[in-house]
Image (cartoon, rainbow, N blue to C red):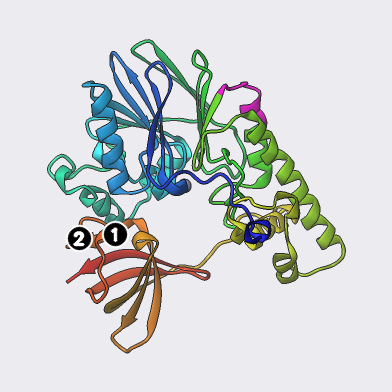
Amino acid sequence: MLAAFATPVHAITPDKAEFKKLADGVYAYVGKLNDANAMIVVTSQGVVVIDTGNNQPETRNIQKHIQAVTQQPVRYVVITQNHGDHIGGTPLFSPPATVVLHARTAKEWAGWKPYQVNTWRKRFPERSEALKNFHPLDAALTFTDRMTLRLGGKTMELIYVDDAYNPGDIAVWMPEEGVLHAGFAGYKERHPDIRPDYSHGTTVGMMKQLEALIALKPKVIVPAHGPLMGTTDLQAMIDYLVIARQKVRAMMEKGMPLEAIRKNFRMEEYKGWDREAHYPVIAATIYRELRGEGPEITTVNERTVKGKIDKIEEEGRYLTVSTEDGKPLALRISNATDIEGVPDRSHFKIGMRFTALYEEQKERNETLQFVVQ
Ligand SMILES: [Zn+2]
């Protein structure tokens, strides 16, 4: 009887990452429990890695899978979106591998603060010698419109769909194999992670990307997160965005204020889709777009904290710590977090004492540096 009332959660990957052959020399690394995916292209002239794994253990796992199928070195790392769970594993391969990224992403990397570059160099202790004095853009290839990467008889089309707010998201298309890495636009039965700061672009930009990708008629699609999918899933996301925009517009026409729209926005037509928690953020993004506003600018303050870890959630992604003055503080540990004394966030322990430099943002706290003593 219980099952009849439970909301089914669709499109979640198994609790162990999978390495799946999609075509000759082409593999999908499907992240566990909807962690970031990667795509691997093995050729007679080297390997291309497309996105780099959710965190350090996942990136090392990708490397292990590559070494199990070839002795060729990784020559290129292609970045489909500028988020930690997609770019964070790059320093395991580059240098000597060349990073291929959109010019907008490269521009953001060029503006990194010294601590961000330092974190990059320290992310994989086994790579500290190779990354000494290395800047992430020291071995990079950028493009603005479209790029064709040919290696060992394989062709990869790097596709950017221009839009004022596309932050540099790209897709990777292999026409001969019919295989597509859809990048950010690839969603299967999951409410999209589209935000008012436009860090993932806009719904308009996303629909443009989806139209362009459907036109390629791919046989199999690797999304940024979640199970492998097909063009019907790309079309389903366009339909979703159209309906979502209609709903927000209707509430705006009734004169509802933003707060009420955030609270009342629902997509009942998509019952069972993953991440209903995204509702208010999707509504707020569409609201800005429909008003013709640019990205929301959040003020960021850097603060330091001394304290100890009281609670660890989601494999160290979220920590609750008590500060010296006894106050609890919630921290989000990103892949860009500099953690001294522990190899990565999966090694956090309750009671561990630390000092941290973190960014305080309007809606969430994001840790920048995390120094365990
Ligand atoms: Zn991601």
Image point 38% across, 82% down: which residue? 328
Quadrant position of residue 295: bottom right
Determine which of the numbered discs, if any, sits on residue 273 in the image. Answer: none
Q: Amino acid at mark 2?
A: Val
Quadrant position of residue 365: bottom left
The magenta stretch spans which residues? 211-219
Task: Locate residue 42, reporting x and y percent.
Answer: 33, 20
The residue nearer to you, when weighing 85 against 198, is 85
Indicate yes or no: mark 2 CB to ligand 1 under 8 Å: no
Indicate yes or no: mark 1 CB to ligand 1 under 8 Å: no
Instruction: Find disc 2 in the rendering and name its residue.
Output: 342
Numbered label tally: 2
Instruction: Find disc 1 in the rendering and name its residue.
Output: 345
- Give the class, few, some or many, for how many residues have Cα within 10 Å of label 1's Cα (few <14, many ≥20): many
Where is the N terminus found, in terms of image quarters?
A: bottom right
The residue nearer to you, when weighing 364 against 38, is 38
Q: Is residue 49 magenta?
A: no
Q: Amino acid at mark 1?
A: Arg
Mark 1–mark 2 distance (CA, rounded to whole Å) = 7 Å
User: Residue reaching furthest left?
Assistant: 129
Does residue 135 appear to the left or right of 360 in the view shown?
left
Image point 74% across, 55% down: which residue? 268
Quadrant position of residue 106: top left
Where is the C terminus found, in terms of image quarters?
A: bottom left
Q: Are marks 1 and 2 in contact (CB under 8 Å)?
A: yes
